[in-house]
Image (spheres, grey):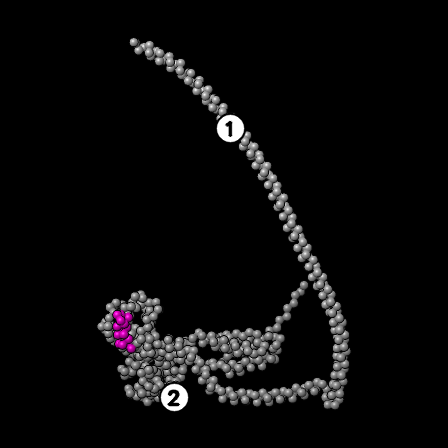
Amino acid sequence: MSPIPIIIAVLITIVISVPVTYFVTSAYQKKVVEAKIGSADDKARAIIDEAVKTAETKKRESLLEVKEESIRTKNELDREIKERRAEIQRNERRIEQKESNLDKKLDAIEKREAGFAAKEEEINRQKEEVAKLNEERLQELERISGLTSEQAKEYLLKTVEDDVKLDTAKMIKEMETRAREEAGKKARDYVVTAIQKCAADHVAETSISVVQLPNDEMKGRIIGREGRNIRTLETLTGIDLIIDDTPEAVILSGFDPIRREVARIALEKLIVDGRIHPARIEEMVEKAQKEVENMIREEGETATLEAGIHGLHPELVRLLGRMKFRTSYGQNALKHSIEVAQLAGLLAAEIGVDARTAKRAGLLHDIGKSVDHEMEGSHIQIGVDICKKYKESAVIINAVEAHHGDVEPQSLVACLVQAADTISAARPGARRETLETYSNRLQQLEDITNSFKGVDKSFAIQAGREIRIMVVPEQVSDADMILLARDISKQIEAQLQYPGQIKVNVIRESRVIDYAK
């Protein structure tokens, strides 16, 4: 059989079956869709009905809640209104009670005012009677005494003045006697107090030296292992080394200024060298001692040349050099000796005395201070012994012994040295006075003046050489100013110690101001 008819038959079958299948499928899908649409409409209507029912239920619940809230709010407002009404009623009753009390008090005050008015009238009447009786008494006293009131006043004032003068003189005498009796005790108290206040600062100022370090690590090297280095340095120099929290610094403490200088130089050399151990410390201390000895000798020679003195014993020259390391009230002892020598020479030349002898005595007058911390006795006695030892003349020895008035001067040279010593020490700036002491003196001066009645303000001026006082014009008259100035002067003289004099300047000023309108 030929395949062509079969292929044709298959094609015809496909052509016929495709449309039929399409129509059948379409009809089925349409039926399914219509069924689903009908079911969805039913569900939608059911949902809408349920929603309407729920909305009506919610509406009824909301209305009930609103009604309950409005009822509750109304009840709270009613309660609050009742409470406020009660409070207002209580306040009204309180105000009424106060008004009643005020009315009662006002009535009582009016009654008291009426009583006061009556008493005032009675007092005025009594005053008139007293004035009349006083006038009569004065007339009777004038008649009996034969004196007028003015004459009687003058007599009484003169009598009182004489009595006051006598009592004042007795009082002044008693006070002077008591002051003399207590002067010694007061002086000792003042001295002890001054020592207590100033000793610590003065000792610290004159017994320590500070050596700066490049860094704080150097402190450990100075101390050394188990403290060997610091013990060696302290043993060789006799000076205490204080290594504390002070940054980059070591404190050398000791009363011997030469030993302290040796320790300072040795320590500075060790710091620069960097090799710090016991053997090196001993070597540097020896070098420092030689350096200080050379410095002492050079300073002594320089002092003799500056003062123009020749022929001194070498040991005296060395002792003079040691005075470079000694101070008195902040004044260098060597510089002070040179000044005294120059001043004594000038004074001697003016009055025709041997200037060389005067200079020599002035240069050596404090020679005892170079060793007074090593030997017993005052620097005067030590200086006399030194001058005798090195065969100085009797004039020089007497000048040294008498420059503080311990013995009578036996020559004009001794008097000149004594005067030159006083001049050098009293020169402004020669001896240091602490700011605290200066301020305290000015404050004491102002406190004394402010203690007087009628003083408004006081000012210590001219470095304490003048006190300017402002007085209250209503309390102090022009005549009282004279007495006030004198009393303040006497008080200052009694309570303060001061050189020279202090000017007391009292100022009284009255001003009247008006304005033209």
Name the spot of residue 151 as percent of width and height, x first. Answer: 70, 87
Is there any visible trace of residue 360 in the rendered image?
A: no
Q: Which mark is residue 10?
A: none
Q: Nearer the viewer, residue 238 or 30?
A: 30
**For the C terminus, which image quadrant?**
bottom right
Q: Which residue is mark 2?
A: 406
Q: For mark 1, does the 10 Å Cα neighbourhood hold few (<14), some (14 to 19), or many (20 or more) residues? A: few
Which one is nearer the viewer's eye here, 134 or 355?
134
Q: Which residues are magenta?
A: 223-238
Q: Verify whether residue 227 appears in magenta.
A: yes
In the picture, residue 220 is in which quadrant? bottom left
Seen as rendered, the residue at the extreme left is: 279
Q: Secondary structure at mark 2?
A: loop
Horizontal and vertical percent for residue 407?
38, 89
Task: Name the quadrant containing residue 425.
Answer: bottom left
The residue that appears at 44% across and 80% down in the rendered structure is 193
Residues under labels 1 and 2: Cα distance?
143 Å
Residue 141 in the image: state x and y as whole percent: 74, 88
Residue 5 at x, y percent in the picture: 33, 10
Q: Is residue 31 above or below residue 280?
A: above
Q: Is residue 119 above or below residue 168?
A: above
* Residue at numbered disc 1: 40
Q: Amino acid at mark 2?
A: Asp
Instruction: Please give left or right for residue 2 compared with residue 73 in the image.
Output: left
- Residue 56 visible? The answer is yes
Q: Main secondary structure of the magenta part?
A: helix
Tell me which residue sits at (28%, 70%) in the image.
223
